[in-house]
Amino acid sequence: MIEDNRLTSHRESEPEKKVLYVVATPIGNLNDISIRALNILKNVSCIACEDTRNTGKLLKHFQISNKLISFHQHNSFQKLDYLASKLKDGDSVALVTDAGMPLISDPGEILVKKIRELNLDVVCIPGPCAALTALVSSGISTSKFTFYGFLPKISKERSSILMMISKSRFSSIVYESPKRIIRLLKELSIYCGGKRNIALLKELTKKHEQNFGHNIDDVLKKLDKVELKGEYTLVIAGNNEPMLNDLISNESLRKDLIDLMKAGLSHSSAANFLSKKSNKTKSEIYRLIIKKDLE
């Protein structure tokens, strides 16, 4: 029999010294962890993790005992030199997040950058990722997409990203908490229109996994009837519709203008956005509020 080299391990002695292993862990279903990941977690010198309690539960389930080092957004810069020194001294270190692939919406990026700058090896142990899991099961185009993670809370920055999503021709992927998912969907309804195709997935790979669709208005109605729990991943279809034409009424544009300003855009920025969306001049839209107030 001819051996297929694509299916053989090229690192028989893992974990190796002076290597940072970026290890993906399950996002819900514990059966999704790989044999290779378990070997790394069991045998590295230590594990840098977002929350020692969460990672501790994972290790206990698989009967693994290893040293855990807290590494999260509030202490990551303080721990960089310590972890780098351990690797330089010949240790092997695994980096994990609470769930899924490290560096995706967590502080691991600065550690990987630091280790690369020291010319030490970084090896990824691939596995689950909520963004890709949601995308491939969404029914929305997977060929090109942009991942935004959790949107910023600051109004101006948030509005800027929402505007990018509304105009993008590619699929967009966003994470959101149950406390803010309704707000996000309402904002997207303003920016993208209520008929924009989306897929909202919650509790991915878990027993109560759910998938809501098919457009923003439909999903908002469905969420009225369910208890908002768990983490949400939202996939938004690209903007493949032609720009709206002059049949859009001034009253409709005026309402959109007010809604955008309430969402945090300045009068000028909101008018500029609607100008591109409706093919009307910016000055026409800018005057809609002023004109109404004078009537």
Image (tube, rainbow, N blue to C red):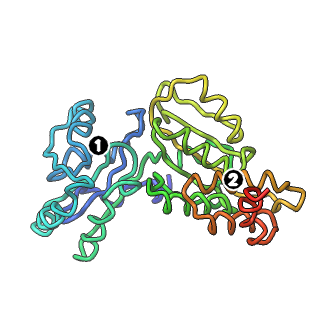
Viewer-closest of 225 and 47: 225
Vertical placement of residue 211 versus 122, above or below: above
Viewer-closest of 190 and 149: 190
Viewer-closest of 200 and 276: 276
| Residue in view at x 20 percent, y 42 percent | 52
Q: Quadrant of the C terminus?
A: bottom right
Which of the 4 image quarters holds residue 114? bottom left
Query: Horizontally, is 166 left or right of 103 in the view?
Result: right
Looking at the rendered structure, the secondary structure element under dot 1 is helix
Residue 135 percent coordinates (x, y): 59, 48
Circle 2 residue: 192
Vertical placement of residue 158 versus 131, above or below: below
Q: Residues within 10 Å of mark 1 (few under 14, many from 20)?
A: some
Point out the frontmost of discs 1 and 2.
2
Looking at the rendered structure, the secondary structure element under dot 2 is helix
Query: Horizontally, is 295 left or right of 19 in the view?
Result: right
Vertical placement of residue 278 versus 222, above or below: below
Circle 1 residue: 38
Q: Residues within 10 Å of mark 2 (few under 14, many from 20)?
A: many
Residue 232 percent coordinates (x, y): 50, 39
| Residue in view at x 41 percent, y 52 percent | 126
The kind of residue tagged 1 is Leu
Residue 273 percent coordinates (x, y): 68, 65
Query: Horizontally, is 54 left or right of 241 in the view?
Result: left
The kind of residue tagged 2 is Cys
Q: Residue furthest front?
A: 294
Cα distance between the residues tagged 1 and 2: 43 Å
Q: Which mark is residue 202?
A: none
| Residue in view at x 25 percent, y 52 percent | 72
Q: Who comes first in sequence, dot 1 or dot 2?
A: 1
